[in-house]
Structures are given as C-alpha cells and as structure tokens.
Image (spheres, grey):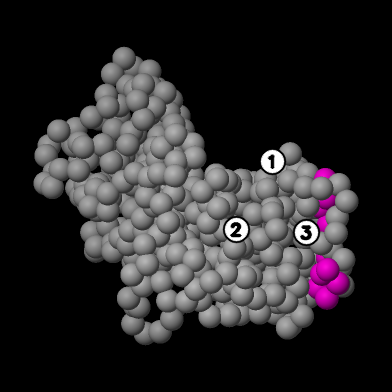
Amino acid sequence: MSEIRDGRMRLTVLGGFLGSGKTTWLRHQLHHGQMRNALIIVNEAAEVPVDDALLARSAELRVLPGACACCEGRDALVALLRAICDARVGGDDALSSLDRIVLETSGLADPGPIVDTIRADPVLIHHLMVDEIIIAIDALYGLDQIRHEPLTLRQIETADRLVVTKIDATAGLELARLVATLHALNPGAAISGAVMGSGADLPDHTGIEPAAILPTEGEEASATIAATRLDLSDETDWPAFSVWLSALLYARGDDIMRVKGVVRTPAGRLLLQSVRKVVQQPEIVPETGAKPTDDDNSVVVIGRRFRAEDLRKSLAYFAGARR
Amino acid sequence: MCANCGFPSVPGHWTEAGASTPTDRLRARFRRAQLLQSVLPAFGLSVHDDGATPGVTLSDRTGRHEMVGDVTEVWRAAERMSGCVIDPLDPRFLAETQDADGRDGA
C-alpha cells in the first residue's frame, strides 16, 4: 500500500499482552533500518515509562505514559497525534520527512477502540490512515493468556499480522499448537515467528489440533471465528455491497472482527477495511496491471456466529434489488 | 480539496465512496435508495431520496418520518422506528429466490 500517495501518514498499531515482546521486536526492526521514516509513539499504562529508553534508534519518539490509549488515555492520544500532524503540515523539519507512525500500545490496550478513535476524529482522518495492526504473542505464555485473558483474544482477533515472539523458549509441539490456535482464531492474519525481534521459522502446524479455548465471558469466546471469502458477482455493485455490509455491521458488528478486500467501482479499485463496527474510509488503490487480479471484487469477512453460506445468500438477496 | 490545508474535503460516509463524477454519485445515490426500499417495507418502513436535499427520509405507516444523513443512520433510525434491528442474516433475507414480499423495486 506504500504506493498510495495522498499526503496522509500511515499508522501501524503494535500491540500484544503485557510482556509479549512488543518493544524488543520493534527495537530490532529499528536496529535493522526498518521503519526508518517512522515516528514511534510508546504508550505505557504505568506512570514511569521505560520502553522509550530502549527505542533510541527511532527517527522520532514520543511517549504517552500514565494511561492506556484505548480507554482513559484516549484524549491524550488524540491530542498527541493532532499535535504531530499539525507540526508536520506546518513544515516541521524533523517531521515532514516521516511517512509513518508506529504506535506501540500498552499491554492492556485493545487495538479496536484505538482504531475507532482515530477513525472518528474529524482532524486525524485527514492526516492518518491505519495501515496495519501487528500483535505480538508470547510463545511460552500465549496459550495461557488466550485461555484466561479475554483481552488477548480481542487483540488477536483484530490483528493483520501476528508475531509469535520468544519462540526459542518453547518446544516444537507446544509452539505448533499455539500457531494452529492463532490460525483458528484469526484465519486472515499472517503469522510469523521471532527471537529477540529477528525473524525465525515457525514449525509446521498442519494437522495439529488447535487448543480448546474455554469460554471466558459466557459463550463469547467459545464461538469459533471463521474467515469467509465473498466473491462479488457482477450484479453485486458497490452500492449493493456497501448497503448490505453497513446493515451487517450495524446488526452484528460485535461478531464481525474484520472485513478486508478490494472492490471494483466506477471510480476505480476501492480498498475496504473495517475493524469491528468501524469502516475506514475506502480509498482508491492503483491498478495493478491491464487485467483485474483474482483478488479484485472479493472481500474477506472474519467473525463468529454466522455461516458462510448465509452471508452469501443474504448478500445475493440485497444485490438482487431490481434496477 | 480544502483550500486551507490541502487535504481532500471531509469524506462522506464510507458507503458513498466509489463514485467520482457527479453523474456516478447521483446514480449510486438512487441505487442505494432503491436497495433500501427493497428491504425496509418488510419492516413497515419506506425510504425516499429526492436526489437534491442531503440524506434520505425514512417514514413509517403512521406517518412518522425522520431525515437521516447516511446509511448507518438509516439502520439506526429503522431500529428506533420499527422496534427491531434489521439483521441481514435474518431468515427472511436468506431465501434462495427472492419473493415479492416487501420488494416493490422502488
């Protein structure tokens, strides 16, 4: 998506439970020159920040201590992001060359509300585009946290990319089970491994049974999350699809974790992304070549408590309105 | 494009993306109204878009009406006026073939 040039900074949200290795992973990326043009924001729930000292290699660093950005620290996050955008547009030398913000959340943050907040802010929406949600998972304690911390589940469900950290700390089968479980919880996310932040191969999880996730909040966590790919037929134009999706998210937004895809419209290829009930303003992405690709006009819906077949039938019903 | 900050003007509702010319925008707008009108009558509601004033007007059989700004607002108002959430996965929307119930094609 880096080819899109609309003046907005890209925002990467880096999350993960307490001690999952977010800062170590980020530090390694910075050390290797990744995210060179990124401003790093570290949010810590504690009053005394420590992570900032570890991230000295970043181009620019801001710290947001004392409150979690997904709940009581939301206003502070918005104020900080607005100030950054303001300074950048105003020609601040240090900021004008940057094209990305990486927000490292506190371990207790749910990325969903953070993305909602940015999306709902009338100023930030013009300056920032949420690009990717990366979640770090501890190889050793990850399964335990998934079982006992509903927050870990919410973090995993909203991720675009899952990084299993400290994979040298656990044996092959346990690790494969964690990977299989992550895959079952969020089939749409890319999963990679890391040791001290550098990439490492994950074991093959084919044929490994995902761990049974016990209900944590009533039946909330027990319903299986599935990814459904919807290929849009010619009669499903963008108005039909968007009216249908808006109804679906309104009625079932709490069960639909992510919707992602590229839809063809008269204006061009539209990139569509949502996190729970909030849909990011779709934007036009460049043509990839002369011919439409296989991924055009298809959308992945990731969520629970619905059948793939019902989604298709319902969409076909909505799209069937006489023209 | 905003003359002050150089950024595009306030984006509309996300469902209104995908049309860059005035003709396409108007066509998409009427198509949306038509789609809504194919769903809402089953809940005792109807929708009208005159193509000129912003938003659409939602009315029920008692003559109550509400003007709403975008499609998400339509679902919210529809829930308020009809007393139930319009769920696209409700069995009535899962029929293989469409029937004429509540679908007047606007």
Dot 2, crowdedness within 10 Å: few (<14), some or many (≥20)? some
Q: Position of residue A230 (x, y in %)?
A: 30, 60
Q: Camera-side residue: A95 or B47?
A: A95
Note whether B27 is above or below A288 in the view shown.
Answer: above
Circle 3: residue type: Val
At x 33% / y 53%, what residue is drawn? Answer: A241
Secondary structure under tag 2 reads: loop
Q: Residue at x 83, y 76 (%)?
A: A57
Q: Which residue is mark 2?
A: A141
Q: Is residue A153 left or right of residue B106?
A: right
The magenta stretch is: A54-66
Say what amino acid the circle numbered 1 marks.
Cys
Location of mark 1 (residue):
A71
Dots 2, 1 in contact, CB < 8 A: no
**Outermost top residue:** B62
Confirm or deny contact between disc 1 and disc 3 (CB under 8 A).
no
Chain of residue at mark 2? A
Give the label, 2 or 1, closer to the camera: 2
